[in-house]
Amino acid sequence: MSLVIRNLQRVIPIRRAPLRSKIEIVRRILGVQEFDLGIICVDNKNIQHINRIYRDRNVPTDVLSFPFHEVTAIHGLCHLLGFTHHTEAEWQQMFQKEKAVLDELGRRTGTRLQPLTRGLFGSC
């Protein structure tokens, strides 16, 4: 099991070791042998922004979950193919390629994912 915990907010203290232990207990209760999980704690402003991008809902929410590994894998593959996002023109090309792949993946699997760099330079 791979577990990554990032605390990007300062309102509620997060103790990683107890959280990690509880997640391991939940994994066993659910009967899951192996899984990768990333937990990122953010403030209301940031979760509202993410909720607006991924779910078209401009309100804070308590939890968002999605198969992030698919997005990161596609982003990484685009870099391996030579795409970058150092300038707006480069970002536009990479964003369009990622979006096309994610849209096709969504069409085939029913998921709705957006490129990691959405909003980096503009409002795509």
Image (cartoon, rainbow, N blue to C red):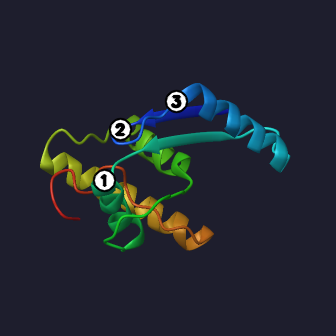
For numbered disc 2, what is the local secondary structure? Answer: loop
In front: label 3 or label 2 = 3
Task: Look at the numbered discs 3 and 2 and tell me whether their residues touch, using CB distance below 8 Å.
Answer: no
**Residue 62 image position (x, y, % from top left):** 47, 59
Task: Look at the numbered discs 2 and 1 and tell me whether their residues touch, using CB distance below 8 Å.
Answer: yes
**Residue 41 image position (x, y, % from top left):** 43, 44
Q: Is residue 1 visible?
A: no
User: Looking at numbered disc 1 in the image, what kind of residue is underneath it?
Assistant: Asn
Query: Going by the image, does 29 lie left or right of 3?
Result: right
User: Looking at numbered disc 2 in the image, what kind of residue is underneath it?
Assistant: Leu
The residue tagged 3 is: 15
The circle drawn on residue 8 is 2
**Residue 98 image position (x, y, % from top left):** 38, 55
On the rendered image, what quadrant is the N terminus found in?
top right
Q: CA distance from mark 2 to mark 1?
A: 9 Å
**Residue 18 image position (x, y, % from top left):** 62, 30
The residue tagged 1 is: 46
Is the residue 57 above or below the residue 67 in the image? below
